[in-house]
Image (cartoon, rainbow, N blue to C red):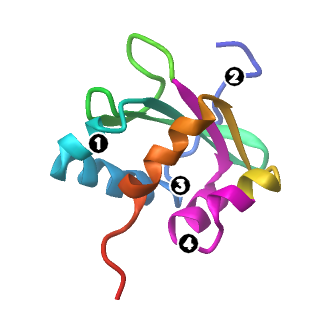
Amino acid sequence: MTASTKLVSAPSLESDAIFQKIIDGVKEDPAKAKSVNGIFLYEITKDGKKVKEWTLDLKKGEVYEGQPKGGKADTTLTVSDSDMVDIAFGKLQAQAAYMRGKLKIKGNIMLTQKLVPLLKSGPKL
């Protein structure tokens, strides 16, 4: 790892709970997750520094902390911890976050559209 890609130590972040929910959802319905058929790398930042990475390997139906195993991500999303939480709870629309530069996407941006149904948090009341 070079100095520019070194991660700052972050024992737990607010967004960790979001990724745990994604892990639970993938375990609950692996076929739905695999239907996305993409590998996403989330780079979570805090105070402008990358502090954690999460991989959503939706080709294999796996979600885990760290870089993709044995390959590279189709899409890399960089977002701050607090903005990730706001996006997950619907306080910030992903498209608006992208347009404002709060969410950076590299790679296959169209593939991110397939994530939307997977990340929705159940039926609305």
Between tags 3 and 1, which lies in front? 1
For label 1, the residue is 33
For label 2, the residue is 5
Helix, strand, or loop for circle 1?
helix
Between tags 4 and 2, which lies in front? 4
Q: Amino acid at mark 2?
A: Thr
Query: In this orientation, does residue 52 appear?
Result: no
The segment highlighted magenta reads 74-96
Q: Could you give the CA–CA distance between mark 4 and mark 1, rounded to whole angstroms?
A: 21 Å
- Mark 2 vs mark 1: which is more N-terminal? 2
Residue shown at 66% from the left, 60% from the top: 83
Residue density around tag 4, few if under 14, some if 14–19, many if 20 or more, within 10 Å: few
Mark number displayed over residue 13: 3
Task: Tell me residue 52's x, y (percent).
Answer: 56, 39
Residue shown at 57% from the left, 45% from the top: 10
Residue density around tag 3, few if under 14, some if 14–19, many if 20 or more, within 10 Å: some
